[in-house]
Amino acid sequence: MKRSTRFDSTLVLLAISFLLLGCDAKLPDFDGIYVLQNNQYIDVPRIKGELFKYNFRNRGGIATDFNVKELINRDKFRKIDQAQFNQKGFLVVQNKEWSEFKLLRVPTDGDLKDNEKSDVIATSIGFGGGMMGMIYSDQGLQKKVDPVEIPIKQAKKGENAFIYAPTTPVEKGYYLVDFKVNGQPQTGWNPILVN
């Protein structure tokens, strides 16, 4: 007796679906930020950028005000394929004290238009001061620049695991993951290169 081709097609689709579900990447055992590479989750470590002080202003012969760039070496950014990132984003195996996850693009406007071509990537520009960090005046200083926030959506992946993906596709470039611990901002970033 001849089977219907429709029945055979359905069986093939079900077999492929089960195979794909069985090949899903194993969730990491430890808290952290991860990206998917070759069907494996790879850790994206937290990096504290180096501070570069420049553009000093003097008052009475004392350097009182200056700009500060936070810089991260290009090779510290964890690489992920653009199509993969737009679909799967990044994984958080979440510590219960972590909250307010954000995806940010490093600044690429104004004085930082060539930022992503450098050997070191600027994450931000801020102000610094001389005595006890006090800023006498920010007039004449280069303006503050922060990374640009990218809207993200969240999906539960496991008991304490969540996927955060961009709500609309992102371009190739340098990105940062940030979050708070016990409601407080933390030093550094989890850097990602979407290529």
Image: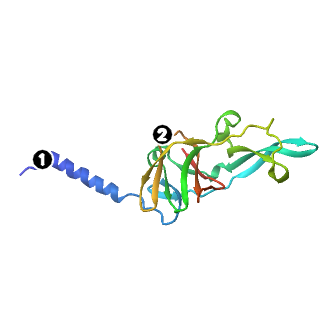
Query: What element does badge 2 sit on?
Result: loop
Q: Nearer the viewer, residue 50 or 16?
A: 50
**Is 51 left, or right, of 176 in this rendering?**
right
**Is 192 left, or right, of 22 in this rendering?**
right
Q: Which residue is mark 1?
A: 4
* Comes first in the chain, label 2 or label 1: 1
- Which color scheme did the rendering employ for the protein? rainbow
Q: Disc 2 vs disc 1: which is toward the camera?
A: 2
Amino acid at pointer 2: Pro
Q: Nearer the viewer, residue 175 or 1?
A: 175
Count of numbered tags: 2
Residue under the point 67% across and 50% down? 72
Query: What element does badge 1 sit on?
Result: loop
Residue 152 vertical position relative to residue 180 in the rendered view, above or below? above
Dividing the picture into quadrants, the one containing residue 45 is: bottom right
Q: Position of residue 174 (x, y in %)?
A: 59, 44
Q: Position of residue 91 (x, y in %)?
A: 48, 55
Q: Position of residue 21 (x, y in %)?
A: 34, 56
Q: Which residue is mark 2?
A: 169
Q: Which quadrant is home to the C terminus?
A: top right
**Inter-mark Cα distance, 2 to 1:** 41 Å
Q: Position of residue 147 (x, y in %)?
A: 63, 43
Residue situated furthest top in the rendering = 110
